[in-house]
Image (cartoon, rainbow, N blue to C red):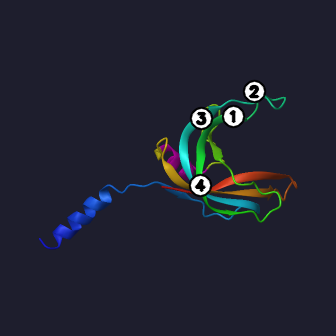
Amino acid sequence: MKTILPLLAITALLSGCASVSYQNVAPLPGETLSTHQTLARFEGLQDVPCRHLTSECPDRCDHGGKYARFAIVEYTGYDKPGKYGDPKQTAFAFRVAHKDGSPDTATPEALRRVIAELSEGQVVGLEWAHVYVTDPATGSKWPERIVTKLAE
C-alpha cells in the first residue's frame, strides 16, 4: 500500500499536465538576419485571400491560404546579427494550409499539429528566425521566417 499511494499521486498530478510543443532541430538553411524569442497570444487561424500581385493571380497562384496568427505580448530575447534583419514585431503569422485546404508542406507537420491543439487567446512561447536563403543550384536568394520553437 505504501508504494501504490505515491504512484497514484504522481499519476493524478501528471494526468492533468498535457502540453503542446514544437522545436525545430534542423540547422537553419541560410544566413541568420535576426532571431526573435517572444511570449505570444494565439489569435486563431485566418483565411487570407490572394492579393492579386502577379499575372497568375488568383487562379494559378499559390498565394493566400489559412494562417496561424499571433499577437506578441512581450519579447524575452532578440538578436539582429544581420544588417537586414527584421526589427521587433507586434504580430507574427505563418501559413498552415493552402487556399484549397491542403497542408502547406513548408510548415512542418509537427508544427501544424501543435497549432491544431492551441486555443484562441492562449499565451505561448514563440520563437522564429529571419534567414536569408541561397539556392546553390540556381543562385536564387530569398528571405524566410522559420518558426524554431512553439511551446506552452
Quadrant of the rendered image containing residue 5: bottom left
Camera-side mark, 3 or 4: 4
N-terminal-most mark, 3 or 1:
3
Q: Is residue 87 left or right of residue 92?
A: right
Residue at 84 percent across and 59 percent down: it is 136
Who is closer to the viewer here, 116 or 56? Answer: 116
Above or below: residue 47 compared with residue 94: above
Q: Amino acid at mark 1?
A: Gly
Q: Which residue is mark 4?
A: 74
Q: Which residue is mark 1?
A: 64
Q: Residues within 10 Å of mark 3 (few under 14, many from 20)?
A: some
The first of marks 1 and 4 along the sequence is 1
Report which quarter residue 49 is drawn in: top right
Identify the mark nearer the N-term, 3 or 4: 3
Q: Name which residue lies at 67% across and 62% down.
A: 78
Kindly report the distance in space between the C-alpha atoms of the residues bearing marks 1 and 4. 28 Å
Residue under numbered circle 2: 58
Question: What secondary structure is found at the residue carrying circle 2?
Answer: loop
* Camera-side mark, 1 or 4: 4
Q: How many angstroms separate mark 3 from mark 1 (CA)? A: 10 Å
Kind of residue at badge 3: Gln
Mark linked to residue 72: none
Lower position in the chain sequence, tag 4 or tag 2: 2
Distance of label 3 from label 4 (alpha carbons): 22 Å
| Spatial separation of the CA atoms under disc 2 and disc 1 | 9 Å
Mark seen at residue 46: 3
Which stretch did the figure color magenta?
108-116
First-in-chain label (2 vs 1): 2
Verify CB contact (< 8 Å) between mark 2 and mark 1. yes
